[in-house]
Image (cartoon, rainbow, N blue to C red):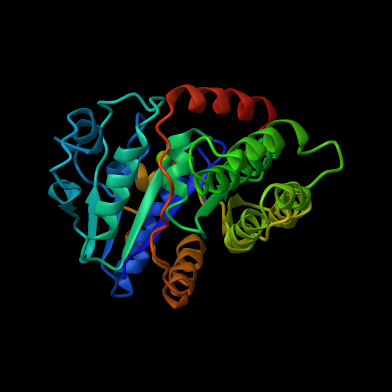
Amino acid sequence: MIKIIPVASGKGGVGKSSISSNLGICLSKLGKTTVLVDLDLGGSNLHTFLGERNPERGLGSFIAQWDNNRSLENLIRETRVPRLFLIPGDSLIPGTANLPFYIKKKILNDLSQLVADYVILDLGSGTSFNVLDFFLASQTGLVVIAPETTSILNAYSLIKGALFRQLYLSFPGKSQERQVLKDFFSHKLEGSGTNLKSIVKDMEGINPASALKLHHIMSRFYPRVILNQGRTDYDLKLGMKLREIVTRNLQIDMEYFAYLPYDDRIRLSILKRNPLSLSVPQAPFVEVLMQMAQKIIKMPKEPLQRYYEDEDIQELQQIQSLLGQSL
Ligand SMILES: Nc1ncnc2c1ncn2[C@@H]1O[C@H](COP(=O)(O)OP(=O)(O)OP(=O)(O)O)[C@@H](O)[C@H]1O
Ligand SMILES: [Mg+2]
């Protein structure tokens, strides 16, 4: 079975593409066939991190000229690293466009059927539905943070948005359960001393089986946070701080997966089009990524999640503005 590893962040520029590309190289070096996918729609640049030339055709044009009968497989390119492949992006569609749900579903289905061990999704930053839905391809997606307050707060919003989206998509359209979730996440959470345990109680009043389902989803949702560009002991502790907020407000667990040090050579390696994991494999940044890759290989793989459709554009817009206010 293939494992999909989404890499997301609440705030931009924290290091998602640097981590995705070098993690991909580490997994390939460990003998695993890995496909890197540039899903930063509108801001795609993953190929530059690998030192690959500009793509003629990428995911943007594939989506812009959507054809249900074509598979993503046609976009795969080899890279100069053995066992590492790339599905490049291009900016033919604006990153802000909400993709229809069936397109996201087909992209994830195609990816889950590739003949590979790992698929790494380099996502855009923020909490758009595109980001959330691709992030939910796994229960254990990677969230990258930098040692700054805004990055931590935005990461919390991302985790909260992803959890809401997963709970929401687990119930059918127009169901009472979806309404309860919408009300709770937009009005009740935070500041009022309420946490997510109380939504399980609210749901029990409607349908005990749905309450159980909520509880089950929340206990399996387990984001893994990576603090990147760390320089001090204080930075190291910021990851713990995020964990504290997530546990307190959302009642879910989160793993503090890795602490990656700041290294100026990363920026230079992009300019030189030679990834750090190839040019300086002994750099601490690369060593930690190698340990991460080994950890990932040891983890059990999970099947792709199945969700109810979400095709009600009006409702989507309403939720987006509700969540926007409270995220
Ligand atoms: N550990 C690090 N140490 C020093 N610089 C880093 C580190 N990680 C990333 N950078 C630098 O930070 C910048 C942003 O990194 P990157 O493009 O990987 O972030 P991103 O999250 O993918 O950004 P975007 O949201 O724009 O896609 C780059 O110039 C990169 O060289
Ligand atoms: Mg990026």
Q: On screen, 264 above or below 299?
A: above
Q: On screen, 107 above or below 300?
A: above
Relative image position of residue 37 (x, y in whole percent): 30, 48
Relative image position of residue 315 (x, y in whole percent): 51, 26
- Give 313 or 39, whichever is nearer the viewer: 313
Q: Quadrant of residue 309?
A: top left
254 horizontally vs 42: left or right: right
319 horizontally vs 56: left or right: right
Q: Residue at x 29, y 59 (%)?
A: 112
Relative image position of residue 36 (x, y in whole percent): 30, 53
- For the N terminus, give its image quadrant: bottom left
56 horizontally vs 19: left or right: left
Tell me, yes or no, if residue 221 can be seen here. yes
Q: Which residue is drawn at 72% across and 53% down?
A: 204
Q: On screen, 190 above or below 205?
A: above
Relative image position of residue 54 (x, y in whole percent): 20, 37
- Give 47 or 65, whichever is nearer the viewer: 65
- Give 268 or 180, whichever is nearer the viewer: 180
Seen as rendered, the residue at the extreme right is 193
- For the C terminus, give its image quadrant: top right
Tell me, yes or no, if residue 222 can be seen here. no
Q: Which residue is drawn at 25% across and 26% down?
A: 92
Number of numbered discs overlaid on the protein picture:
0
Q: Quadrant of residue 102?
A: top left
